[in-house]
Image (spheres, coloured by chain):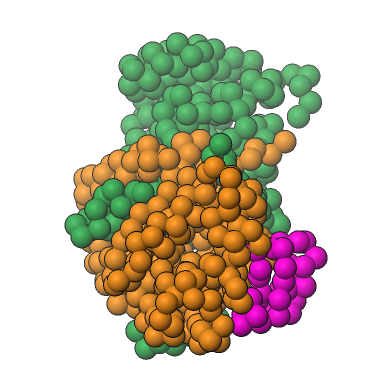
Chain colours: A green, B orange
Amino acid sequence: MPAEAPIYDRVALIGLGLIAGSMSLAMRRGRLAGEIVGTARSAETRDIAREIGLVDRVVDTAAEAVVDADLVVLAVPVGAMAAVAEEIAPHLKPGATVTDVGSVKRAVIDAVGPHIPEGVHFIPAHPLAGTEHSGPRSGFATLFDNRWCLIVPVEGSDRDAVARLEAMWQGLGAHTDEMDADHHDLVLAVTSHTPHLIAYTMVGVADDLRRVTDSEVIKYSAAGFRDFTRIAASDPTMWRDVFLTNKDATLEILGRFTEELFALQRAIRTGDGEQLFDYFTHTRAIRRGIIEAGQDTDAPDFGRVKPE
Amino acid sequence: MPAEAPIYDRVALIGLGLIAGSMSLAMRRGRLAGEIVGTARSAETRDIAREIGLVDRVVDTAAEAVVDADLVVLAVPVGAMAAVAEEIAPHLKPGATVTDVGSVKRAVIDAVGPHIPEGVHFIPAHPLAGTEHSGPRSGFATLFDNRWCLIVPVEGSDRDAVARLEAMWQGLGAHTDEMDADHHDLVLAVTSHTPHLIAYTMVGVADDLRRVTDSEVIKYSAAGFRDFTRIAASDPTMWRDVFLTNKDATLEILGRFTEELFALQRAIRTGDGEQLFDYFTHTRAIRRGIIEAGQDTDAPDFGRVKPE
């Protein structure tokens, strides 16, 4: 992005976890905002943010944070969005844009939309980026580089305001696409929500097996299991809210998953090696596509740092 | 390892894929073998191995490779072990050790054991290391560093021969543990085989959904799905054989998995946020254990190389 002028004069970040923290650091890197104000519900999070200078100014309430802000980012768990929207509504500046970074979009639109006053633009969004870490110390400026941010305009969204938000996300390093809310929720159920639930389940099963001690599961995790534990280490509040608010799409994909799993289970039971081989060969091609699309590295084992 | 003398004068590698190739490179690094002879069933693999100098000498048959070898490593898919054992049996040197690197152990013992002549030591083993890549070009010398290799002595295994094989694996960079075959197969069903089957299934489901196009699944994979595709990109022949030969343990763990998944699915359907939150909180602790055990890095997102 050219750095002549910031895209927004004042940005308010509500919530100071991994995503908001990374946004703040990436906005500074790109000189995208005049001033970055931040707040979080927990006093401890606010104190840490002050201590490490995560944003330009930390305030105690969301209502205070949005005063005079040109862009307001709701970066709280999906289940907390309605209450925050209600709190900030009377304090929003006319012409401001309110956006969010939630992992589901239909539920956020239903929760936040009704609170947005006339003259304020509400443009939901979802950056597809993250790590298994959370909290105010977990952010980093390059989190969004080369990742996708899905913009989900609601009916009648102002095109200039949408273009400005897209420019912001591109300045943060992301590619942007527009998508409608229901399609977003289905795509994410496939690429994110169901995989997370499955990983949580597999880790839970391993932990629950008494004949295989915890220590064995942990020592011998390099054989595949550790990839599941990374996914299953993500923020529990965020994920609880995702499943509660993207219920239908997740249950639909889970149903497909179970059906498919039963078919493979049957192939194992009956010794149908050909079916297994064909299935495993086919899934390899998808991996190749992901590497070609620049969404992962071809380095073996994700290029994990080699032990010295 | 002290480098005064090699641990084995001549090592024969049967199969020249990821594991055997990495063993050869790590043996050279540690000067663990006097001469490394290798063979593979496919002429193309043998040609590549010759071209890149993967081993000291490439021969055309397994029977030829084992002549005068002090250590013979069966590094072929589990389903091919019996035929290889039958082929090499008449050519094995008295006092030699035959080992393998298969992902299941009971089936290998049943397939290979009966062919091993009197006076030859048969000591199954399984290095818990790998990447999603396969073939003669995929090996690297540090693959086993800080990973575990499970040694699975059969009844009456010669203790000196076991100690020598363990010293070899330690020289290759691994920690070693001994385990009996049935327990090994159960532990691996939890830490590796079931996670792989689940990952294959999830990737298959994603590919099969027509409303979510391939391109969307690939573009938006960074949200969790790409970790599954890495696992599901592993060698199809190897994994077919794993599931066919570790059928009972895999089906048992799959049963537990399905039971647990249904409980979480029910919690989503009924909106039981507390149950989801408790489950997701608990699984976080296991991740911590894996990092403390040195089996993964705490770097966010596995320390994937950041795009420039």
Left or right relative to A216: residue A122 = right
The quarter of the displayed image where residue B194 is located: bottom left
Q: Position of residue A87 (x, y in %)?
A: 36, 25
Q: Quadrant of the C terminus of chain B?
A: top right
Residue sitting nearer the eye, B158 or B281: B158
Confirm whether the magenta stretch covers residue B21.
no
Residue drawn at x 34%, y 17% as measured from the top left: A44
Q: Position of residue B97 (x, y in %)?
A: 47, 69
Q: Residue furthest left?
A: A210
Q: Is residue A123 visible?
A: no
Left or right relative to B223: residue A250 = left
Residue drawn at x 52%, y 44% as measured from the top left: B1
Q: Is residue A35 visible?
A: yes
The quarter of the displayed image where residue B164 is located: bottom left
Residue sitting nearer the eye, B87 or A205: B87
- Vertical relation: A207 (above or below) B266: above
Confirm whether the magenta stretch covers residue B57.
yes
Q: Position of residue B45 (x, y in %)?
A: 71, 73
Residue drawn at x 54%, y 67% as measured from the top left: B70
Residue drawn at x 69%, y 63% as measured from the top left: B55
Q: Position of residue B13 (x, y in %)?
A: 60, 69
Residue sitting nearer the eye, A306 or A59: A306
Q: Which region of the structure is painted magenta?
A: B36-65
Left or right relative to B115: residue A121 = right
- Vertical relation: A222 (above or below) A91: below
Residue sitting nearer the eye, A61 or A146: A146
